[in-house]
Amino acid sequence: MNWDAGRFTPPARLAVIGDPIAHSRSPQMHNPALQASGIDAQYIRVQVPVGRVAEAFRQFAACGFLGVNITIPHKFEALSEVDEVDELAAALGAVNTLVIRDGRLLGRNSDGPGFVRSVREAFGVGLADLRVLILGAGGGAGRAVAVQSALEGCGKLVLANRSIEKAEVLAGEIRALGRCRDVTVLGLTDNEIAPAAADVDLIVNATSLGMKSEDARLLPAAAMEARHLVFDMVYRPDGETPLLADAKAVGARTVDGLTLLLHQGAISFEHWFGRPAPLDVMRKGLREAVAS
Ligand SMILES: NC(=O)c1ccc[n+]([C@@H]2O[C@H](COP(=O)([O-])OP(=O)(O)OC[C@H]3O[C@@H](n4cnc5c(N)ncnc54)[C@H](OP(=O)(O)O)[C@@H]3O)[C@@H](O)[C@H]2O)c1
């Protein structure tokens, strides 16, 4: 693992791990927040190969780190390498935030609550008042958003995925939580998605498609309505995702993955320091990082 905590000023005390990790903009969001809060610590990127998360966590603890963010592909591995997982991270089935306290490794998840705050900020509404369609319910992001929506008591949950059996498994787990009465599963074909879209309020892209303009359309443009709220977990520094472009064309309200990145980061900060994060500073840092 390519890091040396001693060579940083201020000292490295926080990190984001992933593989790859060079693209992460989390340092540009967190370092201005640490500075604005008068915290003498630096947030760094560390590339950690699959299978070595436990070793990385031990090294961070030994070097006096306060916490770590965990991104693709380590969120599931991290869940089994911590000393304690809170109820939410256990329900979401993934850890994206590690808090290191008195040498103990505490697993938390800020993706789910970050999604709730993003929906509230972008659309001024809570998930309890929404019927939700998730495109790509087979991956970690789709899972976090689906379980969190159910925990918030959403009116209806439609899980669509290319590999339908993965969505079926998730639907079974969500039904067992008993918090959302109407949970259905679909394949990711136009014939299934278009009628489903007519009966939901919030449409979420949780697939990895959308980074490129030529990526396949997840939803026929004709199925999009002005009343829809559209959330793309993907963000493109160089323009809009195809889903958001279609949504805007019909007058629907939209939000992209940058807002989620901001809010999950703010919640991680709150876990580490027990105080509100300087959200405006973090937002400015992220915007500058994306623009550069
Ligand atoms: N903004 C944020 O803060 C944030 C946070 C987390 C994730 N994300 C983004 O969310 C996306 C998903 O992340 P993840 O961790 O869930 O990834 P993942 O675990 O690899 O899951 C990928 C999902 O996309 C689907 N998919 C992949 N290729 C597809 C294709 N060609 N056609 C249809 N469906 C396809 C998969 O379906 P199958 O199950 O059928 O393979 C699965 O549902 C990524 O773009 C990631 O960057 C953003």
Image (cartoon, rainbow, N blue to C red):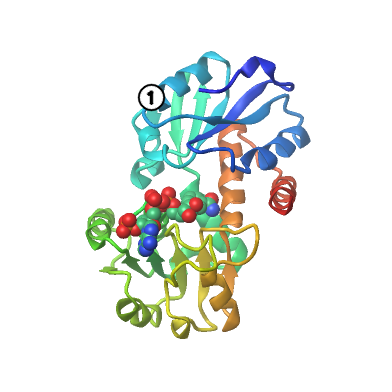
Horizontal relation, residue 272 to residue 168: left or right: right
Q: Which residue is mark 1?
A: 83
Residue 146: % across, % down: 38, 58
Between residues 7 and 176, which one lies in front from this camera angle? 7
Quadrant for residue 29, please give it. Answer: top right
User: In this view of the protein, can residue 156 be seen by the observer?
Assistant: yes
Q: Is residue 41 above or below residue 111?
A: above
Q: Amino acid at mark 1?
A: Asp
Circle 1 — which element?
Answer: loop
The mark total stands at 1
Residue 220: % across, % down: 43, 80
Dot 1, how many residues are within 10 Å of its Cα: few (below 14), some (14-19), or many (20+)? few
Quadrant for residue 32, please give it. Answer: top right
Residue at 54% of width from left, 62% of height from top? Answer: 119
Residue at 58% of width from left, 38% of height from top? Answer: 22
Between residues 213 and 258, which one lies in front from this camera angle? 213
Q: Is residue 217 above or below residue 274?
A: below
Horizontal relation, residue 116 to residue 164: left or right: right
Dot 1 beta carbon under 8 Å from ligand 1:
no
Q: Is residue 52 above or below residue 30?
A: above
User: In this view of the protein, can residue 102 be seen by the observer?
Assistant: no
Between residues 116 and 163, which one lies in front from this camera angle? 163
Residue 49: % across, % down: 43, 30
Q: Residue furthest front?
A: 214
* Quadrant of picture, ligand 1: bottom left
Horizontal relation, residue 253 to residue 104: left or right: right
Residue 245: % across, % down: 58, 74
Between residues 213 and 84, which one lies in front from this camera angle? 213
